[in-house]
Image (cartoon, rainbow, N blue to C red):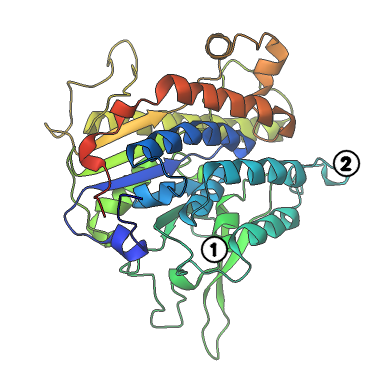
Amino acid sequence: MNYRVKDRDQHLASDGGPKRILTLDGGGLRGILSIGILQKIEDTLRLRHGGHKSFRLCHYFDLIGGTSTGAIIAAALAQGWTVEQLRKKYMALGERVFEKSLFRKGLFRAKYDEQKLIEELKQVYGARTKLSSDKLNTGLMVVTKRLDTGSPWPIGNNPRGQYFEERPGGVIGNGDYLLWQVVRASTAAPAFFDPETITIANKSNFQAVSGEFVDGGVSPFNNPALQAFMYATLDGYRVGWPTGAEKLLLVSVGTGAADPQVARTGTTAKHAINALLSLMEDCASLQETLLQWMSSSPTAREVDGELGDLRHDLVAGSPLLSYLRYNVDLRSEHVRALDSNLTSSKTIKSLSEMDAPENMDTLHRLGALAGERDVRPGDFAAHFDLPRA
């Protein structure tokens, strides 16, 4: 290889050099669509850096962040998995974990058995691997939400973070959290999986303090791109990267924008879940608008007829970052334009579902087609290329 491979601390260092962030949205099994797009990103960046098969996305990106299914993908990439390795594992995981059961129907229990997910996550990351492990080759940020306090928790492996190591009062440092458990907490979507309990503090002679964690998608950060930008640049997180279009690159990959016209009817409980999903989509749309407002973005889309794509309406006068967003619009006309072989309206409508293993092949194909259509070598500016060895 003709570039220098960094370790975690070198990736996360505030050394004044250009930094690169990759973020991955939540969206249940629609994460396989993200993997289709990621394959094109990996192929493009591999060619930029010599074409050797040993290239990994964790070599290029200094921080990889994810929410929910995006956290599963992010943690595997941070460990050095190729996208193809991840695709194979994700397909198998989806079939096993999202197996429907007549015994788990009803309003008062989760739809799926979290034990199956836990077993899979332990296999992927290791049962005893901690967030501080050197198995993580680059920066990692996982978005989850602590339900008993109502606060989003971006949990990262930055060794300079003020909560990374044990604190007075027996407060357990983030670095001692088990990686599989952090990812499992981020995937604990209400109604789909039960919450994950994580011990926050072990107090001698007192009762331990635990937190109930649920899917980061029920925070404003199902799309974790804005949270990752804040994690990298706000003083409180102690990462300390500089801003600027030539200093910071943020690549955000979606799981497909659900079709708002797909009927969402049913019981009162289902209406409540659907209202939450709608709010998540509103938050995602707002985040894309904010990031385009702050950035230089060759992939900027039209926000609406009034705002346009915000290329010439920067909030700070000059861009705070370079920003790339790749996603697939799952409305029928856009799906058909991307894949002319998809003609069934019923099939296209079902693609917005987050727990349909039977859709994974189709979703992956759509992601791959979108990657071929949308990911261009010119999107990745030369000043973000890895330094030569």
Asked if residue 389 lies left or right of residue 223, the reply is: left
Q: Position of residue 149 (x, y in %)?
A: 49, 59
Element marked by disc 1: helix
Q: Position of residue 10 (x, y in %)?
A: 29, 62
Residue furthest out toward the left: 317
Element marked by disc 2: helix
Q: Position of residue 316 (x, y in %)?
A: 14, 35
Three-letter amino acid code of the residue under disc 1:
Leu
- Report which quarter residue 213 is drawn in: bottom right
Q: Nearer the viewer, residue 11 or 98?
A: 11
Q: Which mark is residue 39?
A: none
- Report which quarter residue 98 is drawn in: top right
Q: Nearer the viewer, residue 12 or 160?
A: 12
Screen quadrant of the C terminus: bottom left
Asked if residue 384 lies left or right of residue 262, the reply is: left
Question: Neighbour class for label 2 at 10 Å: few (<14), some, many (≥20)?
Answer: few
- Identified at 37% across, 70% down, the residue is 163
Read off the residue under disc 1. Answer: 179
* Label tally: 2
Residue furthest out toward the right: 102
- Report which quarter residue 179 is drawn in: bottom right
- Identified at 76% across, 52% down, the residue is 113
- Identified at 60% across, 56% down, the residue is 184
Asked if residue 313 lies left or right of residue 45, the reply is: left
Q: Position of residue 348 (x, y in %)?
A: 65, 16
Read off the residue under disc 2. Answer: 102
